[in-house]
Image: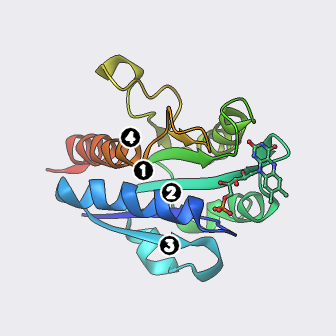
């Protein structure tokens, strides 16, 4: 079962986290690829049962290039599929959760089923999606890997016959 982890990244932080999520998904049996929104593989995204999207936080909100991609999301036949969001930021109060909300709002607009990775799943709590920051106390690569695993488990639960 295919999954896409789509990201915009200028200096590599968001790309590295996207790769961790895809790795976590693969460890749970999904055929997952991390793909830049600047090099999109349209057929792969269309065939994915789970689409996770991530962006750096710019000015306490999503980056313009990730937002521009979101405005094309309807072209990818995402209705009824599982969606999730992740973000990177320099500061833990730098606006990462606003970035997540912007992504999740677009997914809901297009009729996706959205999942956070589960605040109720115990530690580490992932409320709306993982956010990494320059402060090492939270949002570590391990959390992104675990988030990928949780998204994959939910995708299989929903779509495996
Ligand atoms: C133009 C610009 C604006 C930014 N604004 C914020 C911000 O408001 N809050 C924050 O925490 N980090 C901010 N950052 C830091 C980035 O979100 C952070 O370094 C991110 O991980 C970069 O991702 P990338 O390496 O994938 O490009 C900003 C960075 C740039 C270049």
Q: Quadrant of the N terminus?
A: bottom left
Label 4 element class? helix
Which residue has dot 1 on it?
A: 81
Quick one: label 3 or label 2, which is nearer the N terminus?
3
Where residue 55 sits: x, y (%)?
65, 55
User: Residue 43, can we see it?
Assistant: yes
Q: Nearer the viewer, mark 4 or mark 3?
A: 4
In this rendering, the answer to whether 145 lies above or below 41 is above
Q: What is the quadrant of residue 39 in the picture?
A: bottom right
User: Residue 49, can we see it?
Assistant: no
Q: Residue at x 23, y 43 (%)?
A: 153
Q: Residue at x 54, y 45 (%)?
A: 85
Which residue has dot 2 on it?
A: 78
Cα distance in 3D space between marks 1 and 4: 23 Å
Cα distance in 3D space between marks 4 and 2: 25 Å
Q: Residue at x 70, y 42 (%)?
A: 99
Question: How was this image coloured?
Answer: rainbow
Cα distance in 3D space between marks 1 and 2: 5 Å
Badge 3 density bin: few <14, some 14–19, many ≥20, Cα 10 Å: many
Q: What is the quadrant of residue 76 in the picture?
A: bottom right
Label 3 element class? strand
Which residue has dot 3 on it?
A: 35
């Amino acid at each position: 079962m295919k999954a896409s982890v789509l990201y915009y990244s200028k200096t590599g932080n968001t790309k590295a986290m996207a790769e961790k999520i895809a790795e976590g998904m693969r460890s749970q049996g999904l055929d997952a690829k991390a793909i830049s929104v600047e090099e999109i593989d349209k057929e792969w995204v269309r065939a994915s049962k789970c689409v996770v999207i991530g962006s750096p936080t710019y000015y306490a909100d999503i980056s313009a290039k990730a937002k521009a991609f979101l405005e094309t999301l309807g072209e990818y036949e995402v209705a009824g599929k599982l969606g999730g969001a992740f973000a990177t930021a320099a500061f833990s109060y730098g606006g990462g959760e606003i970035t997540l909300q912007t992504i999740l709002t677009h997914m809901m607009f297009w009729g996706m089923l959205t999942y956070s990775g589960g605040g109720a799943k115990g530690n580490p709590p992932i409320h709306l999606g993982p956010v990494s920051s320059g402060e090492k106390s939270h949002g570590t690569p391990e959390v992104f890997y675990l988030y990928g695993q949780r998204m994959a488990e939910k995708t299989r639960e929903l779509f495996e016959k």
